[in-house]
Image (cartoon, rainbow, N blue to C red):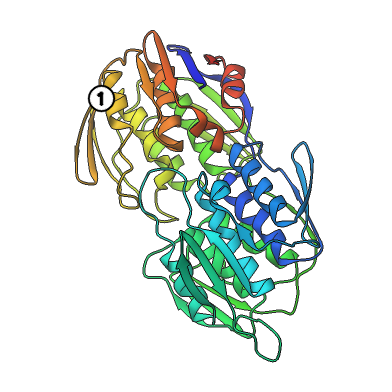
């Protein structure tokens, strides 16, 4: 099993290019199931989850061609309408094949998903939505089996008005894809507003879908007979952008991010400014400078456009060495403070009660052996290792490779002393 070894105490300096967004790439790859023509994608990140999704699609009959950050997906020869457990267990986003398969072929058999251990994240919303659109669904032997009854020899979903009890990004994405080929109009209410949902909608529109309202809490989809091929560039990864900015702020560095977007990072940039960072934005670049020990920042996670749950762990690492105390409230997933005990091993002073963590900043963390528990907790421990005195060894870094493309190479480029141990 691979580990990361980090010698802390080196401020990050220089320039780094941000990769395409994992959370946009995965659903957009699933959109290839909606058409018999080729979907050409660019700015596709080199991530373990992207490879897993590509293998899953190929197993169904999608032809895939990879050239660097370009990926061509041809859904003209799909012959297997199943996502098996061995492919789905490592990645929850695999459930996103359900909506497209049912929409185009009238049936699908998809294993209940796995992924990070940061909460239940049930697929009930996906199932209820498809049922409202006319699919008959049963759960058998750990699989979701969905089928649309044939009418006049055709298995076609019907448009419906669907209200989400809780905001769900993957639920919104799955049902939006399903609705593109449904008969009539589908309205998704209390829909997720994340930029990645908008990116998927833009790709679907380029494929011929009729979608309006993406980015708001009400999305309207008018079904069309078929979708065609398209070319689409994956948006930059806002969580990778935020992670590098927090790492620079925590280490007292000065960095420039290229190929990123500030307009989808408002709350993160506000909190970094509150921590004492100087930030300058130009076109697709963000420049951050930090000249003093960070100030503590309180935060509360909530669905977009509020503070992202995927940045909570990174800011906790920042708060561990900040000047005062901070209160951090997590409202999205119930198990998202699992990195706390690992940060304590580095000397952090953190108390957790329910969904609230109180972090009292200390002048210095000390290197130690720690273990990553999920994707963003891994990033949090990397940031903590960068500021800690001495060596930090991070175990179970396969989580990192699921969401950060070549993170140690990028950090080395910025002056960090970091290496991968095999």
> How dense is the environment of label 1, judged by Cα within 10 Å: few (below 14), some, or many (20 and up)?
many
Q: Nearer the viewer, residue 218 or 47?
A: 47
Secondary structure, mark 1, is loop
Residue drawn 47% across and 71% down?
138
| Quadrant of the image containing the C terminus | top right
Q: Nearer the viewer, residue 328 or 62?
A: 62
* Residue at the extreme front of the image, as rendered: 141
**Placement of 166 over or under 361, stated as above or below:** below
Which residue is disc 1 drawn over? 361
Residue drawn 43% across and 11% down?
9
Return the x and y of residue 96 as percentages of the image width and height: 57, 59
Q: Nearer the viewer, residue 61 or 48?
A: 61
Q: Nearer the viewer, residue 130 or 84?
A: 84
**Placement of 252 over or under 85, stated as above or below:** above
Q: Is residue 338 visible?
A: yes
Return the x and y of residue 180 as percentages of the image width and height: 65, 73
Residue drawn 68% across and 46% down?
55
Q: How many marks?
A: 1
Q: Is residue 215 visible?
A: no
Return the x and y of residue 113 as percentages of the image width and height: 48, 53
Q: Which quarter of the picture shows residue 370?
A: top left
Q: Which quarter of the picture shows residue 158?
A: bottom right
**Placement of 382 over or under 50, stated as above or below:** above
Q: Which quarter of the picture shows residue 151?
A: bottom right
**Placement of 35 over or under 133, stated as above or below:** above
Return the x and y of residue 216 as percentages of the image width and height: 50, 67
Residue drawn 36% across and 28% down?
318
Q: Would you say 112 lies left or right of 227 here? A: left
Q: Would you say 335 lies left or right of 132 here? A: left
* Residue at the extreme bottom of the image, as rendered: 152
């Amino acid at each position: 099993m691979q580990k990361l070894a980090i010698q802390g105490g080196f401020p990050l300096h220089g320039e780094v290019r941000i990769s395409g967004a994992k959370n946009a790439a995965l659903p957009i790859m699933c959109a290839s199931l909606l058409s018999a023509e080729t979907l050409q994608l660019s700015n596709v990140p080199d991530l373990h989850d992207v490879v897993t999704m590509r293998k899953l699609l190929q197993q169904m009959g999608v032809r895939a061609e990879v050239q660097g950050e370009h990926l061509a997906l041809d859904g003209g020869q799909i012959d297997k309408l199943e996502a098996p457990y061995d492919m789905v267990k490592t990645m929850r986003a695999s459930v996103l094949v359900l909506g497209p398969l049912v929409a185009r072929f009238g049936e699908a058999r998809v294993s209940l998903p796995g992924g990070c251990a940061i909460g239940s994240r049930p697929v009930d919303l996906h199932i209820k939505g498809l049922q409202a659109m006319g699919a008959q669904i049963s759960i058998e032997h750990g699989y979701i089996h969905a089928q649309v009854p044939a009418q006049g020899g055709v298995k076609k979903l019907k448009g419906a008005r669907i209200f989400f009890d809780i905001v769900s990004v993957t639920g919104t994405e799955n049902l939006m894809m399903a609705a593109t080929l449904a008969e009539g109009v589908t309205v998704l209410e209390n829909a997720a507003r994340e930029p990645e949902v908008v990116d998927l909608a833009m790709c679907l529109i380029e494929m011929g879908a009729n979608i309006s309202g993406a980015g708001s809490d009400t999305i309207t989809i008018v079904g069309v007979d078929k979708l065609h091929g398209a070319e689409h560039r994956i948006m930059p990864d806002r969580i990778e952008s935020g992670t590098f900015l927090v790492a620079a702020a925590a280490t007292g560095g000065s960095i420039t991010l290229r190929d990123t977007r500030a307009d989808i990072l408002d709350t993160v940039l506000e909190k970094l400014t509150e921590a004492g960072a100087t930030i300058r934005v130009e076109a697709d670049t963000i420049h951050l400078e930090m000249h003093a020990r960070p100030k503590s920042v309180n935060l509360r996670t909530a669905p977009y456009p509020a503070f992202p749950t995927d940045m909570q762990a990174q800011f906790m690492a920042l708060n561990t060495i900040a000047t005062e105390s901070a209160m951090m409230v997590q409202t999205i997933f119930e198990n998202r403070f699992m990195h706390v005990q690992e940060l304590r091993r580095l000397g952090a002073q953190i108390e957790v009660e329910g969904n609230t963590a109180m972090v009292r900043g200390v002048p210095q963390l000390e290197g130690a052996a720690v273990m990553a528990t999920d994707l963003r907790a891994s990033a949090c421990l990397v940031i903590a290792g960068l500021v800690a005195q001495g060596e930090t060894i991070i175990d179970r870094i396969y989580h990192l490779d699921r969401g950060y493309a070549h993170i140690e190479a990028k950090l080395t480029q910025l002056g960090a002393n970091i290496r991968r141990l095999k």
